[in-house]
Amino acid sequence: MNEISLNIDGRKVTAKPGMTVLEAALENGIYIPYLCYSPDLKPHGGCRLCIVEIEGMEGMPTACTTPVAECMVVRTSTPDIDDVRCNILELILADHPLDCLTCVKNQRCDLQKVAAYLGISERILPHNDRNIPVDDSNPFFKIDRNYCILCQKCTRTCDEITCANAIEVISRGYESRIGTFGDKPIMESNCQSCGECVVSCPTAALTIKESAVPAYEVETTCPYCGVGCGMYLGVRNGKIVAVRGSDSKANSGKLCVKGRFGIAGYVHSEERLRSPLIKKNGKFVEASWDEALSLIAEKLSSYPKEQVGIISSSRCTNEDNYVAQKFCRLVLGTNNIDHCARLCHAPTVAGLAQTFGSGAMTNSIEDISEADCIFAIGSNTTEAHPVIGMNVKQAVRRGTKLIVADPREIDLVRFADIWLRHHPGTDVALLMGMIKVIVDGKLHNIDFIKERCENSEAFMESLKSYDIDFVERITGVPREQVIAAARMYAAGNPSSILYTLGITEHSHGTDNVIAIANLAMVTGNIGKRGSGVNPLRGQNNVQGACDMGALPNVYVGYQSSTSPETKKKFEAAWGGNLSIEKGLTTPEMFNGACDGTFKALYIIGENSVLSQPNSNHVIKALSSLDFLLVQDIFLTETAQLADVVLPAASFAEKDGTFTNTERRFQRVRKAIEPVSGSLADWEITCRIAEAMGGKGFDYENTSQIMDEIAALAPCFGGIKYERLESGGLQWPCPNADHPGTPILHTKQFACGKGKLTPLKYRPSEELPDADYPLILTTGRRLFHYHTGTMTRKTEGLNIFMGRERVQINPADAAKLGLNDDDAIKVISRRGEVEAGVEVTRVVPPGVVYMTFHFAETPTNMITSCAVDPVTQTPEYKVCAVKIEKSVCL
Amino acid sequence: MDILSGYNREKSNLVSILQAFQHELGYLPEDIILRVADYLRISPATVYSVATFYPRFKFVPSGKKVICACRGTACHVRGGGRVLREIEKQLGIKAGETTPDMEYTLETVSCMGACVLAPAMMVDDEIHGQMTPAKVSEVLDGE
Ligand code: SF4
Ligand code: SF4
Ligand code: SF4
Ligand code: FES
Ligand code: FES
């Protein structure tokens, strides 16, 4: 692109085409005062402070809305301009409190900056005290309209970036102000509390309640979801006092409510574990590290190796997970290691490995918004992956078509062109039905199928069983909608599929994933920007925990644990004998514990009691073990069952890397010292290894661990800490010069040809009947994370949602005589739990929705034990329940 | 109510839809705003923002008669303020309020375009010019 040269204040400067005069000036170090401009928002031209004179143009155009042009001559300050600017500012100051010295925004306020530039230090017009009451209903930020200058940055942010439109300019003339629907407190609005508006506000009108100016900032990666937002932790006196988004490729500065406001509450919680605990006579007593380690070493060595295992953690770093699987394989001598991907995306790994040869998100977060058409199925993106949710909505506003398939009327439905409300668990029928419509309509990509896929004949033949009558009957989606969605997806060039656990957590989860892969292959939507099959991974490092080989069947980098070559390679590298037996999965370990064939378990950072299905079975299994060791940052429901508990450091207190959903290795950096008594997870595992005589656990830092990973796993060969300093790296990254891989399968599939795979529709295992007439489906809410061990330590998040409220359709609620907030029991064949009620049309009749965020309502007491036969992933998304009103006092 | 069915779900229909409801109900109750937002797939705050921009939309039911006092400059300099205070006194409500018996709603505008007749007031659509506090009861009673 040609640069444009222009003249600003007598200086020759260059600018890129499309830049505004204001941007060109700022980029060249020339300050033009402004209040409503933001590089993240569309030009607004509201405050008029950025006026300039441009030769050949009438009057004083605003620099923020005027594009640069070749040979333009601009003057940013003349007596006339300054006069107008002073008038504007004086009008603003007439309404403004001017208590700068005591204002929280002092020295960080744009209004102050502009006043200083114009040399205005006092109010000239008579003061007009507005005296508007402060809205401090939101637990995290407050709105003080007395400081508002109506620049509309906040409302534009909520419109253009968050796409929530919770706040707008309301009323008119002198009465206009920032407000919500009905001018109510912001807590009563649809505000998602992302805080993006607060960040954008140039004055003290929107401010974070608990915040201080940090002494220093450390860039790291959010510990919550798989988006992997880059963030700065601001630290002062050893405490995290501020959090802001960093410009990582994953989030471009944005954060959601959990990342922005949900960190310090748990990191600095009083309840953090500070000492090893040993259970003596049924009670925990504090112990020294030495005592705990020697007990652990003695216990773990005392069982046959096939009776010992580890459940590692997708909340922990890659380095933690790598060390855990090395310890398991080398010191414990078994492949019995697993982690919670078993519960969520194992079908993704299995299904995509089978069809494409690699079980990961094919594209990058960044390019999703380049799709012509986004098909989101089984993904409540706005709540589970909020920052990607923002991207999807922004894309829709720019014209991308959106198809949503979900039994619930999730937030994205409002943005969708087509909403397919299929019955829970009928995804295979829906997807294969769409494929049949595409093929029958000759909308498939014949060249792509011919060149890049195999097995197409058998596959096309198999579509016969998905005629539209069948699809309509099984899914409950009117045929016109199935057809329209199929056509819309096929017409998109490119089209992208997003999915999450609504696809995988079924007794036919792997089939669901394969159906999605089929749909993408048939239309050639693989291997280019804006296309792909994009499983959004749930936890911050669930991708990494899989990558690092915290799985019974593969070592780090997906190298098979049952292959003699791999065994040889790792024996040579690690210096010890390794097992060639495939290890046990989590459900197998639990079943073994119940039958007495599995004796000792080391759980790292997982609250299995609340997160695994059918909790009674889990509790029974854990209590039947001879020895249970739990390592965590809190004394979770699971840790309470342990014989020994070890205190781990939180993400803010350690170094390492997380790999986000788009396969991007990103640095986690230590911002503060670990809570006294705790250690990073990898350090703890290394100490146990050494106490058991293990060799090769004497790492000095996590960078050394990464070097070992790079040396042993070809797909991570080029990952080095130095290279992660400037943004992350997406694997495969085989060598030091490789730039990383934003898009998989561009030329050919990882396994050569893509495998089109015929599928048979199977209904979910436990369907409603006369005794248990409702379908229970489970998932997440925006304000909490998983079993709530972290988010529930932040008071503000509890204010948003403090207990389980089961979503139920008004029709079902009427039948049962239920109203909002009634106390109920939800009962399945496995048990019952108590909860509150939210009557809402979000769920269809016959379906109820719950989370597993609340220990008080351990939803997994009642979920089903049905599993996907390939991966043993539990069917969290469908089980049969009934509801009774609790008789409460 | 199938006012909505007369419009497609384009956001550009917002003002027309609001107008139709205002006409039908005399004001825009909250649940209507929520329904309109839902129908057009926009946020209720956006609907509210647009609705509050136009003086013709009301958010509380109006009384049978709508009294309007002018606060414009011409009226102001000729004693419009005293007229307004007198109306407030007689009706026992403040500007923007409605009498409990739902008989009268009192509003103000910033010019009625009747500046030659200043100070002016309006009862429903009828303008009364050259008002004085003394004339207020006459105008109100005369109705
Ligand atoms: S916090 Fe987020 S959702 Fe709420 S008003 Fe601000 S930008 Fe909008
Ligand atoms: S609250 Fe802040 S960002 Fe919003 S309009 Fe007022 S000054 Fe601007
Ligand atoms: S979207 Fe996910 S990664 Fe980003 S701030 Fe929120 S929880 Fe953290
Ligand atoms: S910055 Fe240009 S008008 Fe406000
Ligand atoms: S100012 Fe009152 S009518 Fe114009």
Image (tube, coloured by chain):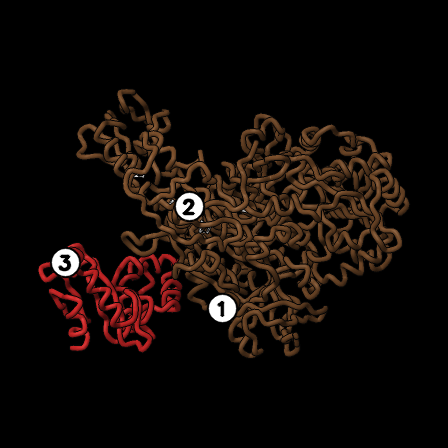
Chain colours: A brown, B red
Q: Are marks 3 and 2 in contact (CB under 8 Å)?
A: no
Amino acid tagged 2: Ala
Determine crowd level at label 2: few under 14, some 14-19, many 20+ residues with C-alpha closer than 10 A: many
Q: Element under label 3? A: loop
Residue denoted by label 3: B78
For the residues tagged 1 and 3, is the chain the same? no
Determine crowd level at label 1: few under 14, some 14-19, many 20+ residues with C-alpha closer than 10 A: some
Foreground tag (1 vs 3): 3
Q: Give the x, y percent position of residue B53.
A: 29, 57
- Residue with the most extreme top position: A11
Q: Are marks 1 and 3 in contact (CB under 8 Å)?
A: no
For the residues tagged 3 and 2, is the chain the same? no
Q: What label does residue A436 carry, if any? A: none
Q: Give the x, y percent position of residue A760.
A: 60, 62
Residue drawn where x is 30% and y is 69% of the image: B93
**Is disc 2's CB within 8 Å of ligand 2?**
yes
Q: What label does residue A841 carry, if any? A: 1
Q: Give the x, y percent position of residue A613.
A: 70, 60
The residue nearer to you, when weighing B13 against A90, is: A90
Residue drawn where x is 51% and y is 61% of the image: A406
Chain for disc number 3 = B
Determine crowd level at label 3: few under 14, some 14-19, many 20+ residues with C-alpha closer than 10 A: some
Chain for disc number 1 = A
Question: Mark 1 or mark 2: which comes first in sequence?
Answer: 2
Foreground tag (1 vs 2): 2
- Is residue A434 in view from this perspective? yes
The residue nearer to you, when weighing A229 against A88, is: A88
Q: Are marks 1 and 2 in contact (CB under 8 Å)?
A: no
Residue A513, by quadrant, is: bottom right
Quadrant in which ligand 4 is drawn: top left
Amino acid tagged 1: Arg
Residue denoted by label 2: A205
